[in-house]
Amino acid sequence: MENQRELQVQQRKGRRVMLFPLPLQGHLSPMLQLANILYNKGLSITIIHTNLNSPNPSNYPHFDLISFPDGFSEVEASTADGVAFVTRLNAVADSLKLPRIVLRTSNISSFLVFAAIPGLLREKDPQSEAPVPEFPPLRVKDLPPQSVAQYPDKFYQLFTLLASQTRASSGLIWNSCQELEQDAITALQQEFRIPIFTIGPFHKYFPAYSSSLLSQDQRCISWLDKQAPKSVIYVSFGSIVAINETEFLEIAWGLANSGVPFLWVVRPGSVHGAEWLEALPKGFLEMLDGRGHIVKWAPQQEVLAHPATGGFWTHNGWNSTLESICEGVPMICHPTFGDQPVIARNVSHIWRVGLHLEMRLEREEIARAIRRIILEAEGLEMRERIKCLKEQVDISLNGGSAYKSLESLITYIKSF
């Protein structure tokens, strides 16, 4: 064992990778996971990061962390100003004049859609049910036209930059695998003639690892321990999505009316005009008599892996979707922006392991969807399908396609 450590130290000398993540939760988590994967393969790691959402150095003693003053705010990073934000970060990366391998933190299907956006937005009605022939089973409403309509020049610039900078890179890493996106990988290889490495899901390399920027409430696990197997619907819309008070109340009454136990993540400030739960009807939780549990943030991987969790109502960020697949938990899809509608469509119509709410936050619609997932035969069939998908992903990581792709990536990096 000691000899193996010494060998890794020797291999690490002169083999350094610099990683530069976008400083938002959905981007930081996979980048830090990738850093750990590469480190365990014998590479030295330097993380260049902004002051916004900077990683805690005590959590990463084996990495070199270098910060630079950025002057960014989270508002700037997550709105239309994000176009300028990304452009500024790219300029910093290019100034290093090193071979650049790109990590895309969404899924491959979404990337292909985004790269083709300027030629796809032919419909004026953003809610059109018309199919997108180039990307079945997508509809026009699954594309991101709202933002484009509001800031067309900026977003066309971003989409163009997305494709051109990827083509100009030395390679492309995906937090995905062939078992999930074989058709999309084939299309990607035809359009982007650079080395492609599908080595995900990243979080499965380190099941106990968490890179959450928010403090996790572990007490919800004790609550789950008291619930029956596959009986709980877990509800979380990620680290950015915000809703108004009307939507919040429809969700609350939908959960209550479903008759199903629920664990609900409500981030402080995620309801417009409220600090936390002020908008809940008086006596709401008491009325449920222990059937509902609300937290500010949850240890999501633990929750999804818990025997009591039977379904996940999600915004369909790619990290959350992967975590649900990897634990065999069917989904209720409530996408709101960006790549989420495309991912949700994959969940509901390609893998067929979830229900799509179609943006209808109405209490009876919500209650019905929860009962379908948790209590009815339809949900049981989805659970069987996602269990098969989970098994395929496990095989991919253990000697299969993802394992082989990672070995190829390490060889490729060491060739520079």
Image (cartoon, grey):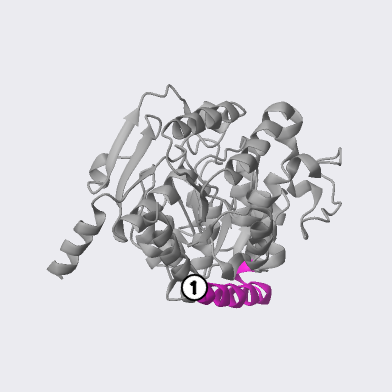
The picture places residue 56, in percent across and down from the top left corner, at: 29, 40
**Relative to 22, 213 lies left or right:** left
**Relative to 369, 94 lies left or right:** left
Q: Secondary structure at mark 1?
A: helix
- Observer able to see residue 57: yes
**Relative to 346, 208 lies left or right:** left
The picture places residue 222, in percent across and down from the top left corner, at: 35, 61
- The quadrant holding residue 184 is bottom right
Which residue: 62% across, 43% down?
A: 249
Q: Which residues are magenta?
A: 373-393
**Relative to 301, 321 lies left or right:** right
Q: What amino acid does circle 1 point to?
A: Ser
- The quadrant holding residue 127 is top right
Position of residue 69 relative to residue 308, above or below, is above
- Please tell me whether residue 182 belongs to the stretch shown in magenta: no
Which residue: 65% across, 44% down?
A: 336
Total marks in image: 1
- Please tell me whether residue 389 belongs to the stretch shown in magenta: yes
Q: Main SS of the magenta segment?
A: helix
Q: Which quarter of the rendered picture does the N terminus lie within? A: bottom left
- Observer able to see residue 261: no
The picture places residue 351, in percent across and down from the top left corner, at: 66, 68
Crowd tier of the residue under label 1, counting other residues whose Cα lies within 10 Å: few below 14, some 14–19, many 20 or above? many
Position of residue 205 relative to residue 389, above or below, is above
Q: Nearer the viewer, residue 180 or 25?
A: 180
Give the residue at the far top of this rendering. Answer: 71
The residue labelled by disc 1 is 396
